[in-house]
Image (cartoon, rainbow, N blue to C red):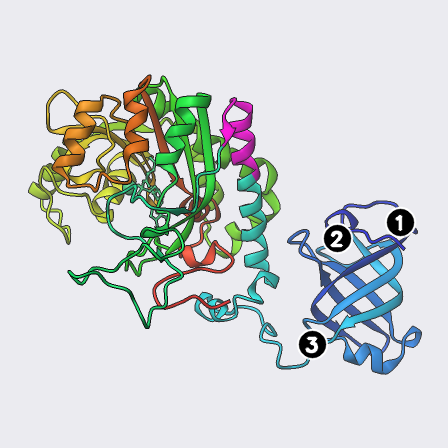
Amino acid sequence: MKRTRIVEAVKMTQYGETVNVKGWVRTKRGNKQVNFIALNDGSTINNIQIVADVDKFDEELLKSITTGACLSVTGKLVKSEGAGQAVEIQASEIEIYGLADNTYPLQKKGHSMEFLREIAHLRPRTNTFGAVLRIRHNMAIAIHKFFHEKGFFYWHSPIITASDCEGAGQMFQVTTQNLYDLKKDENGSIKYDDDFFGKQTSLTVSGQLEGELGATALGAIYTFGPTFRAENSNTPRHLAEFWMIEPEVAFIDLAELMDLEEEFIKYCVNWALEHCMDDLTFLNNMIDKGLIERLKSVVSTEFVRLPYTEGIKILEAEIAKGKKFEFPVFWGCDLASEHERFLVEEHFKKPVIMIDYPKEIKAFYMKQNTDGKTVQGTDVLFPQIGEIIGGSVREENYDKLMARIQELNIPMKDMWWYLDTRKYGSCPHAGFGLGFERLMLFVTGMQNIRDVIPFPRTPKTADF
Ligand code: 4AD
Ligand code: MG
């Protein structure tokens, strides 16, 4: 008999019809006459209640059905008398696919997030992770829909690269060399001639540089793929492997870039509100009571647009009034997340798009302002999260870009192709990168970035 997914079964009203569902046992309770089994197949946060009359089934079979076991159940769909569900299934056949004995780690409810990280292979079977992972899928769909509808092309930047887009030296090397027998030249430097690619290569920190090649040919592209950073940041907001969405657009300026950033985030958040209400309601009840309200508020408020210099003035005025921050504030400093969160959560009480940063604290490719001090970079700062987007208008002037590359001592050997975009038919263009898991943190209300990706990679952890 054809299986009905539980997401559909719980909405059915064809009482009396025979249906088949398959899934994992969440709980079982009962008495001498009847057993109640809550079954979940991951298609929804909701379980379906299976009612098994004790005299209809072998006692041993019913006994062996415990939390975590996998079943196929056929039976009549009936209106439920009990509270909490509209329908239930009066079982006529139960087939056990897989038993789960009492070592199954998800016996009780209410495990800590830390414990669940240790069993990341099983945590997708919990309510919380089921909800988070269904929302994650929905956000991915929303992202593709948003850009597709706007005429952007999905562009695949390579994962293995010989250039360091952010110039921060936080790259994981890719090599097939025998690490016990590295070939070195007379100066003691490693020789890459015999390595797989014949040069030093790494996992990409950003698909932007190749994305710019796409934008300056197809007009507007976006990437959506994994990126890697070997930064030793053990924080609830950093992963060593995270997914990034990087649109890159020809012929737009800073104001249009900010419009795109704002419209994009609002579209995604609104998508969650329209398509994930069951899961959001669960997370709102169990994880973060202010979640749905916060999501609605972001969709309906206009983001603040704030030059960096103004932001520094606000923070300095606050410090003069007695406010204490851990890190110092001065023009030229890289804002710490406590500063960003103060501006967003306490001062403006809405998302802030900060622009015109000192060039010293931003990457080489950002368009230089005429003041000689600042660049047209933008960071979108969010409540609870801090930086959710980093982007900029790109320096399209060959000479200015070259001067900056030389100033920063960026190795030119592997950048010739990037410079060619400024040499042949250069054009104004801009783009940004949104950290997918930072968006997920915001949309789910989860507190730690390790809990919005199935298998997090962080310093000293690469299990599963
Ligand atoms: O600000 P970032 O470093 O910007 C870039 O990589 C640009 N090339 C993007 C572009 O203009 N196309 O990173 C962009 C975003 C951050 O705002 C943050 O949301 C996320 O990527 N991010 C991380 N997310 C999780 N873990 C990390 N270690 C992250 N580093 C950056
Ligand atoms: Mg950044």
From the image, state whether disc 3 or disc 1 is nearer to you: 3
Real-space CA distance between mark 1 and mark 2, rounded to the nearest whole angstrom: 15 Å
Count the marks: 3
Instruction: Name the residue tied to disc 2.
Output: 6
From the image, state whether disc 3 or disc 2 is nearer to you: 3
Q: Label 1 near label 3: C-beta < 8 Å?
A: no
Point out residue 325 in the picture as x, y percentages from the top left corner.
Answer: 15, 50
Name which residue type carries label 2.
Answer: Ile
Real-space CA distance between mark 3 and mark 1, rounded to the nearest whole angstrom: 31 Å
| Number of other residues with Cα within 10 Å of mark 1, as a class: few under 14, some 14 to 19, many 20 or more | few
Any mark on residue 15, and which?
A: 1
Real-space CA distance between mark 3 and mark 2, rounded to the nearest whole angstrom: 21 Å
Badge 3 marks a residue whose secondary structure is loop
From the image, state whether disc 1 or disc 2 is nearer to you: 2
Instruction: Name the residue tied to disc 3.
Output: 100
Name which residue type carries label 1.
Answer: Tyr
Point out residue 338 in the picture as x, y percentages from the top left corner.
Answer: 23, 48
| Residue 311 appears anywhere in the view | no
Residue 138 relative to residue 229: left or right: right
Quadrant of ligand 1 in image: top left
Point out residue 49 in the picture as x, y percentages from the top left corner.
Answer: 77, 61
